[in-house]
Structures are given as structure tokens and as C-alpha cells.
């Protein structure tokens, strides 16, 4: 497609179009250019249509564009890879991203290890506590759910709940209500346990 665009104010867009259509540009430059278009009011779907890429590609690039500036500098210096940044982008917390990457030795900076480090504080939607509480109840209390944008196309995209402590509190409250109902039947005592096997915990 051909569009007539005024010069200086659209330099980033012109450069992005030329490099995506004609030749590859440095990844960090593409990330920064997409982010500038969004900051200027462009929507991801409009950007995808304009440059002939998928909406998912744009969403992934925008997610990567929001990683820690320190990590972006590492990418520019080729001290970090795009796959490493994709693993770290599972959290928006820059301090967590930087700690996972820069505090780890080189051998522990594989995308798989970085992802595992980032996800330690999260909990899968399929976890037993999540199924007991319910995602809707978690969201109603201000919980946040994230999706792995970088999962392979042939994989299910798992959802993660970012506040494990909130899930535990909600599960304890829900189970506590059940315990109160049981206690009202006349039992001498009732206790709850969120983990383990009950008969092995209580004398």
C-alpha cells in the first residue's frame, strides 16, 4: 500500500514501515517504534493491519517494549536475548525482572529458568486452591490474572494468578465457613487444613 505522509512528525512510522517491509531492523528498534505508535494513540489492531503483521505479533512486541530499561539496554548490547526478555516479561515488575536476570549466573539465565523464577510467586489457574475458590471470586477481590503471550501457537495459553497470598486467604475463609457449619452440628472441635492429608495432620 502507498500512503502519502508528511515528513518529520512521522519519522518513526516511516522508518518502521521501510524496515519491516524491506529488511529486518534491530529488534530493540522495532519494540521502541511500536511503543511510540501506541503512545501516539494508535491501537494494536491498526498497527498490525498497517504493517502486515499479526495482532499477536504486535501484542508480544508491546509487552517486550515494557520490560525494564536496564534489560532493554542489555538487549541492545546483545547481552540478553529476545527469548530471555519474553520469559521475564511474564511480570510487569521491573525490580523482579532485574533480580531474576542480573542476580543469576550466566548458566542460569536460560529462558526456562528465568520463567520458573518469575512464576514462583504466581499460581496456575488449574491449581486446586484456585479451583476451590474460583477465578471470579479472586478477581472480585482485586486479584490479577495474566496470560503467557509467548506460549507456542500449538500450546494452550495458561493463565496465572499473580497473588498467591490472596488465593490462600480466600480459600481459608471459604473452608472456614464450611468448618463453622460442621461445628454447629455439635462436634467437639473442627480444624481446617489447606495442604497435606488431614488424617496425617491431626491426632
Image (cartoon, rainbow, N blue to C red):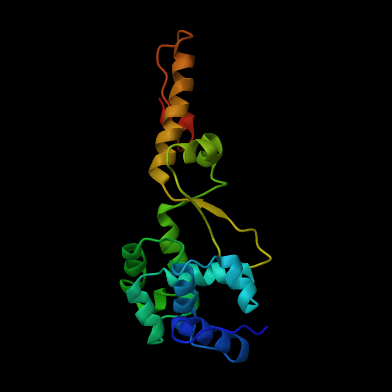
- Can residue 184 be seen? yes
Q: Between residue 37 and residue 88, name the one nearer to us.
A: 37
Residue at left 43%, top 34%? Answer: 170
Image quadrant containing the C terminus: top left
Compared to 73, does 201 lie above or below?
above
Q: Residue 182: where, in percent of width, then height? A: 49, 15
Image quadrant containing the N terminus: bottom right
Left or right of 95? Residue 34 is: right
Q: Between residue 77 and residue 116, name the one nearer to us.
A: 77
Residue at left 44%, top 40%? Answer: 167
Q: Residue 185: where, in percent of width, then height? A: 49, 9
- Quarter location, residue 72: bottom left
Q: How many marks?
A: 0
Compared to 72, does 123 lie above or below?
above
Residue at left 47%, top 78%? Answer: 33
- Quarter location, residue 18: bottom right
Q: Residue 70: where, in percent of width, then height? A: 32, 75
Residue at left 60%, top 66%? Answer: 45
Compared to 126, does 84 lie above or below?
below
Compared to 176, does 68 lie above or below?
below
Amino acid at each position: 500500500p502507498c500512503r502519502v505522509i508528511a515528513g518529520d512528525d512521522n519519522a518513526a512510522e516511516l522508518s518502521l514501515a521501510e524496515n519491516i517491509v524491506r529488511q529486518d531492523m534491530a529488534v530493540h528498534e522495532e519494540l521502541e517504534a511500536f511503543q511510540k505508535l501506541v503512545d501516539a494513540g494508535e491501537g494494536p489492531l491498526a498497527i498490525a493491519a498497517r504493517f502486515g503483521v499479526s495482532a499477536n505479533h504486535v501484542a508480544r512486541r508491546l509487552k517486550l517494549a515494557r520490560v525494564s530499561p536496564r534489560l532493554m539496554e542489555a538487549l541492545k548490547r546483545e547481552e540478553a536475548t529476545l527469548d530471555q526478555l519474553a520469559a521475564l516479561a511474564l511480570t510487569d515488575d521491573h525490580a523482579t525482572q532485574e533480580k531474576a536476570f542480573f542476580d543469576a549466573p550466566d548458566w542460569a539465565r536460560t529462558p526456562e529458568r528465568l520463567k520458573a523464577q518469575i512464576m514462583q510467586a504466581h499460581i496456575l489457574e488449574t491449581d486446586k486452591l484456585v479451583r476451590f475458590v474460583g477465578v471470579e471470586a479472586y478477581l472480585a477481590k482485586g486479584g490479577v490474572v495474566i496470560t503467557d503471550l509467548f506460549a507456542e501457537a500449538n500450546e494452550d495459553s495458561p493463565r496465572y494468578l499473580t497473588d498467591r497470598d490472596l488465593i490462600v486467604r480466600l480459600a481459608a475463609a471459604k473452608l472456614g465457613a464450611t468448618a463453622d457449619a460442621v461445628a454447629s452440628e455439635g462436634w467437639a472441635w473442627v480444624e481446617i487444613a489447606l495442604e497435606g492429608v488431614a488424617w496425617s495432620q491431626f491426632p
